[in-house]
């Protein structure tokens, strides 16, 4: 870490945080200011990319809604191509690079080709959203655990009943344990919010549990929809991307 | 957020991240450089406090091992005293302010006294440690969920069998669900690592599950002890503070 500029032939898998440039880490800013090539995901904001140095080669590598504009192998090839030309490569992911991305695959590829790399953490959306809502994520009396989950299937397809049935089973969210001990944040919840809420309720989470849906979190277009699992509708949360915060500790100041 | 300096009479509850100053957010750095009063926790590093502006009044408010040097009410009183003198107050917490701290109580106090405040997220230790170990926290094939938990009891006392028995019950960590779907990170695991591991194994987590204990994470004194739940010992992890990463997705590069 520290203040070292991006090094020739190195790849940096770095988190860009939720979108607000002021939530970048100093390390990621330093890399943006010095990397030769930047490979940003779709969700990395223009304000952040504007901080790259003027001669940087920015190649967007976002994938949307299961319709890849570029494949994972294509991203690997770009990292290899540019690092082997002795350029420094900043692979910039929204949020944190090690959760709900494919960092494991990218690291395996880099190791396979002996490409030196560094991982730089970023603020993941759950924490930025909670800060913006001024709500704790855990609470000594209401929630001693935070669970970050996704309703996206590994294959990239949304198969709610199956996915939620396996990932968020009644055994996992045993009512008393959930109610007293957990905050649940669901990234990429899909658009079938009512189905998701019904599945969670069927698994034993009380219908009156607070549920806050945040659309386009931490951007100027952020919309906050505070409700309960019982009253969550498909339309309520607003446009994608949406993140859901569920639990007794979630007490947004809105 | 943005670039606004710390405002007179305002309180900022901000995350300082894990200790490395390069993992501060730009927002927290801006507040450090402009706040009149800084109230840091014990775990906020000297390197970070050195970034405060030269005239800043730094008042450490750490609490150690249940032996409070200052009470929570004392922290509240300091926030009130200085903000009511129209000073800007930076309440600086290690990691992120909204998880495993008492931000909910501090926000309730600030609201009660109509003190304007802002929350600034920080990199929580789990993400910084994973970056330093170069291991994913989730993986499409091994873990679709990340659970951040603590073994500390709400009262501040360590009562492992009881706490783990209620917070990490067999129902919660049903073996198949855990093995296939979850990474578990335990903050403040106490010192009875063997008891904790036995309790997790008794709850159904396979003994061969990878377990990495990191002592003094992200500092120059960091020690990494990679083992399995079956082989975790009380001595292995090294000096406090320790954080445990448990799950199939945890594949540290050491």
Image (cartoon, coloured by chain):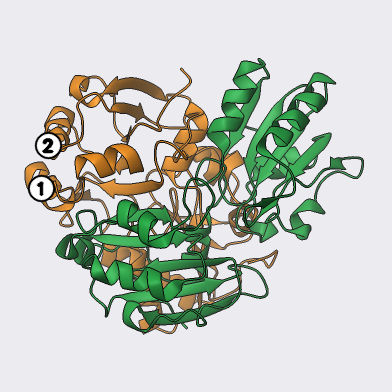
Chain colours: A green, B orange
State the SS at label 1: helix
What chain is tagged by disc 1? B
Residue A73 appears at what percent x and percent y?
A: 69, 33
Circle 2/circle 1 CB separation < 8 Å = yes
Can see residue A6? no
What chain is tagged by disc 2? B
Which corner quadrant of the image does residue B101 belong to?
A: bottom left
Q: How crowded is mark 2: few (under 14 residues within 10 Å), some or many (20 or more)?
A: some
Q: Tell me how far mark 2 sits from mark 1, CA to CA.
A: 8 Å
Residue A63 appears at what percent x and percent y?
A: 68, 50
**Residue B165 tag number:** 1
Which corner quadrant of the image does residue A83 belong to?
A: top right
Q: Relative to A1, does residue A185 appear above or below in the rendering? A: below
* Residue drawn at 72 percent across, 58 percent down: A45
Q: How crowded is mark 1: few (under 14 residues within 10 Å), some or many (20 or more)?
A: some
Residue B240 appears at what percent x and percent y?
A: 29, 32
Q: In this view, does A232 lie to the left or right of A236?
A: left
């Amino acid at each position: 870490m520290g203040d070292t500029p991006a090094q020739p032939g190195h790849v940096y898998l770095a988190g860009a945080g939720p979108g607000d440039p002021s939530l970048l880490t100093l390390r990621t800013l330093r890399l943006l200011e010095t990397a030769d090539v930047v490979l940003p995901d779709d969700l990395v904001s223009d304000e952040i990319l504007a901080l790259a140095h003027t001669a940087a080669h920015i190649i967007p590598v976002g994938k949307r809604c299961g319709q890849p504009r570029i494949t994972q192998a294509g991203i690997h090839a770009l990292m290899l191509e540019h690092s082997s030309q002795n350029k420094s490569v900043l692979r910039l992911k929204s949020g944190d690079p090690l959760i709900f991305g494919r960092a494991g695959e990218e690291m395996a590829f880099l190791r396979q080709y002996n490409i030196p790399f560094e991982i730089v953490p970023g603020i993941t959306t759950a924490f930025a959203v909670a800060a913006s809502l001024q709500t704790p994520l855990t609470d000594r009396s209401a929630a001693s655990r935070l669970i970050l989950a996704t309703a996206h299937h590994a294959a990239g397809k949304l198969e709610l009943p199956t996915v939620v049935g396996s990932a968020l089973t009644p055994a996992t969210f045993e009512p008393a344990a959930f109610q007293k001990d957990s905050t649940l944040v669901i990234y990429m919840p899909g658009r079938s919010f009512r189905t998701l809420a019904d599945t969670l309720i069927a698994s034993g989470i009380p219908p009156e549990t607070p549920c806050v849906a945040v659309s386009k979190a931490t951007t100027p277009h952020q919309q906050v929809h505070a409700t309960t699992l019982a009253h969550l509708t498909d339309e309520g949360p607003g446009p994608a991307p949406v993140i859901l915060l569920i639990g007794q500790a979630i007490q947004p100041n809105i």
